[in-house]
Image: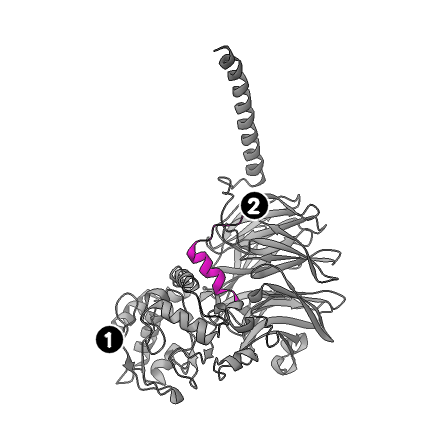
Amino acid sequence: MSMRRTCLPIVFVFVSACLCAIVALRSRVVSANESLAADRPQSGWRGPAAVWLSPDGATLLTACEKSGTIVAIDTARREKTWELAIGKSLVAMAATTDGATLVACDAAANELMVMDAGDGRCKVRSRVPVSARPAGVVLDADGRRAWVTSKWSREVSRVDLAAGKVDQVVQLDFSPRNAAWLPDGRTLIVADAFGGRFALIDAASGRIVRDLSVPGHNVRGLALSPDGQNLLVSHMILTESAATTRDNVFWGIVMTSNVRIVPITSLVDATKNPVREAHTHFFGDPGNAAGDPGPLALLPDGTAIVTLSGVGEVAIGRFQPFGFRRVHVGQRPVDLAVSPDRKRAYVANHNSDTISVVRIEDQSVEATIALGPEPQWTLAEQGERLFYDARQSLDGWFSCHSCHTDGHTNGQRADTFGDGSYGAPKNVLSLLGAASTGPWAWNGSKTKLAEQIHQSLAESMQSRSAPSGRSVAAIAAYLDSLPQPPIVAWQSADRAAIDRGGKVFAARGCATCHEGPTYSSTELFDVGIDDGEGGNSKFNPPSLRGLAHSAPYFHDGRAKLLEDVFREHRHRVRAELPDGELRDLVAFLQSL
């Protein structure tokens, strides 16, 4: 009893001290960000999506897509110093030149977060609602306004940071993602998130001054050359006429990874063709491909750093004369920041939950910094990692994401043996929500999603080894987790027209092929068009959900617009639709 009486005060003091330490720690974290409700659990996938390096190079901040946190790293000690839970899904980040103000896009909350960051900490100043699914952000030169690209809304929002509100919206007819300023500081170039389209926007008026397109898709990097003479664009090119035979994939004929160097003069002068005047450089060789190029940086001495997201590498070298050395980093590098002395690059590896510290001079990885304990990957998370891994294809030429960008579609045609034939390229369909709309393949030949995935890996991607059942199951689980695109304002603005269009849809018998909640069918139908050399004239109708985001239409993409489906191709419409009925029907279809 005497021993117990002696120990009790000691235990009490010890417990009290621990509680005080915990309270102090919690107070420190909360004071760093007043909006923080609770400490973020230390386990789980962070998914670094964007990085920013302080002007003195001492602190690296990482915005995380999966955890909604910002992770700070001390670059001298190369260790994580703090982590703040400030959002749901952080996908892009930018900062003023002095590092005093930081902004980050929250794709799940549809917000731009404006933060004070001058003292090496982050404190949310305001949360500005922006259009649905913000995907990218850049700041004006003076740091007073942010320009936010919103993918599904097809809008670019200008945000007054001091006022904490959107003061201008530019509507596009494609889904934007990356953006960059041209040298004049007044013109913003915005790239398509899926295909190869671009728009030049006058910042003062919000007017689109030029529309452009290049042969390509999956634009993931825009960088201005230090001399201001060129814009560097990383993207992929799909050769639709090249069937995915082993030889075609091996030689890089089906899909290539590219950096296109475009003279600024060809962008701003409407009389010039930027495609003709650009120089295109290819990454990857037979036996050592380089799928899915991502963000890039060009240093004043001409050294270029290009992330090769699909194969977990960065390429460091020069375009003139062309020569690069590739360095293995982590899985799916998606962003990079270069130190002020230009000796190191910090690379965010989304699917490894790490930051790689790369020495630029000798092209070597100096350190790997974990953002947290290694996650216990769920089956769907394993599938997501495989989906973005180009090493699932022969030699690493392309990933599932290369054609189905972020699970959607690149808007191209590909000859993939999906219907058991070749010689007739088919439209790449969106996979968003597709897990519940079987059967699969244009001819409906796959009644199980796993069968379609297995064929895609074995035939379309020419996987070096037979796809394992585990890999197939994991990718299927990931696809099952992908929702349809959200219904956004431009799709649902005219409710009266949508209601009338729904009646036209019913009266014209459209539900015969597109029925039920998915607006699809398990049957095959002859709609009066065939695929030529493929010999198919009957097709399984794809779901109409998300149709507004899935142009072009039909199995071969012959209809560029929804109106063309009925006006030019008379799709299952015996009598010509009056203009009013056609407008209403299109409004209804776009609202699905």
Measure the alpha-carbon separation of dots 2 and 1: 53 Å
Residue 47 higher or lower than 14, as above or below? below
Label 2 close to label 1 by CB (< 8 Å):
no
Task: Judge the density around disc 2: few (<14), some (14-19), many (≥20) Cα neighbours within 10 Å.
Answer: many
Q: Secondary structure at mark 1?
A: helix
User: Badge 1 is on which residue?
Assistant: 512
Nearer to the camera, 392 or 435: 392
Q: Residue at x 69, y 70 (%)?
A: 324
User: 583 above or below 478?
Assistant: below
Given the current orientation, which residue lies at the most extreme front position? 465
Residue indicated by mark 2: 125
Q: Dividing the image into 4 quarters, which one contains the C terminus?
A: bottom left
Q: Nearer the viewer, residue 121 or 476?
A: 476
Under mark 2, the amino acid is: Arg
Q: Position of residue 544 (x, y in %)?
A: 34, 71
Label 1 Cα neighbours within 10 Å, binned few <14 / some 14-19 / many ≥20: few
Do we see residue 187 in this rendering? no
The reply to whether residue 464 is visible in this rendering is: yes
Secondary structure beneath label 2: strand
413 is higher (above) or lower (below) than 168? below
Q: Position of residue 459 (x, y in %)?
A: 44, 76
Which stretch appears magenta?
374-389
Numbered disc in front, either 2 or 1: 1
Q: Residue furthest bottom?
A: 533
